[in-house]
Amino acid sequence: MNEHSRIQARVILGDIFQEGGRLALARKWAAVFSLVFLAGCSGICIVDAERSSVYVRRDDGRFREVPLYVGENGYATLKRSETHSFILRTISFDGKELSRESMPLFLTGYGGDEYAFSDNGEKVAYVESIGFSPLHRLRVALAHAPNDNLLPDGVCDNLRAFLGYSVFWLSPSNILLYANNSGPFHEPEKRADICIVDINGMRVSLLPGYDSCGCGPILLSPSRRYLLASEEIIDTRLYRLHIVDLDVGKEVFVITPRGNEMEAHGAVWCSEDEVVFAVDGVVYTQKVGSPDKREVFRVHPPCGIWLYAVDSARGLHYQLFDKRSCPAKKIGGWRVHNIETHVDRKVTGEQITGRVLLNRKRDKIVAAVGR
């Protein structure tokens, strides 16, 4: 099941169960669907933005391999094995395997955003269900012992999100947990949706979140100081984009797109103070703090567009799909458009189907792909 299908399942199931107030059950079923994570024609694609080179490494076996993090010398992946365990590997950009480690099967679906490894791969933070209740807990553990929680009792062990979580490492000792909530079940006066956990001092900072159906972007800026959090605009298919300064713990800017529709991957960070977003097939950039947006380029019907990343050369990596049929049907594979020169080219015929990650220099892009 690719990323389009997972998001569709989450939205559809949310609609089905919302009337009865059972979005938590909908989330569980969406997670069950995401378990259909078979390899097929999938793989990992590595793009070097400076050299304009592309390398694809195909999956083998039944289960897919997903990228975890990207360093300066290589990247790490996670894959479920035939023996009901995980295989954690680090691989150089030229394809050489640097390390391999077996891990307990501590997650059910491993293609989403509800877990993250630290930059050096030593620790993992993930959200765990508490029995059959709608509550969850955050676990932080050493990668070689993921079931041994480093957080003491009472720290982030009473979480509630109806539409999933996003987990990020801000630094070697700080984790950001974002809870996706929406509609009548969102009670901001009773619950903060943004948690920042300092695992050294075991301090937890709480910030209010935003109403979201779980499909809009939740993204960190390149320096990880700013959070872009989407808010569903009622009775529209648009998202209001909130910029939160995590250093001071408050919102500093809001982008309110005008038009009819934004896609699930409708916005990405262009730089530390600039956002790229697409409305009705038109791609814009806008500086944080500026009321003005600039048109970059546009696509024409029947194409829809998903945005994934902006590299160090100001290349916007994106993908088109046919809006007249199942959104999983892509057109033309992975493309890149230079925001300054407007040179647009095809990167590869591979289709992005999962996580898209960059290194700190933003000159290496690693993504889960398929056909």
Image (cartoon, rainbow, N blue to C red):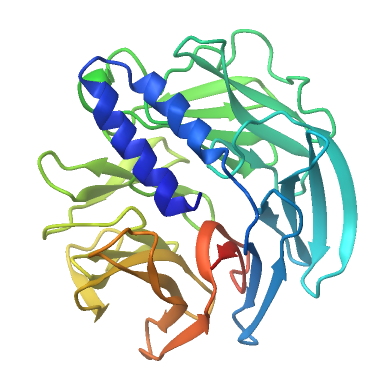
The vertical placement of 322 against 160, above or below, is below
Indicate left or right for 205 with 209 as reference.
right
- Residue 167: which quarter of the image? top right
Q: Where is residue 169 drawn, in percent x and y?
A: 61, 41
x and y percentages locating residue 353 in the rendered image? 51, 59
Q: What residue is rendered at 42% in x and 27% in y?
A: 27
Position of the C terminus by quadrant? bottom right
Residue at the spot 65% in from the left edge and 32% down from the top edge: 125
Write the residue at 79% across / 42% down.
Answer: 81
Q: In this view, does 11 lie above or below 58?
A: above
Looking at the image, which residue is at 40% across and 91% down? Answer: 343
Q: Which of 356 and 5 is in front in this view?
A: 5
Residue 359 visible: no
Residue 85 appears in which quarter of the rendering? top right
Rendered image quadrant of residue 121: top right
Q: Can residue 68 be seen in this view?
A: yes
Residue 260 % position (x, y): 12, 58
Rendered position, 195 above or below 2: above
User: Of 137 and 237, which appears nearest the observer?
Assistant: 237
Counting the numbered discs, the total is 0
Give percent across and percent down for residue 170: 59, 43
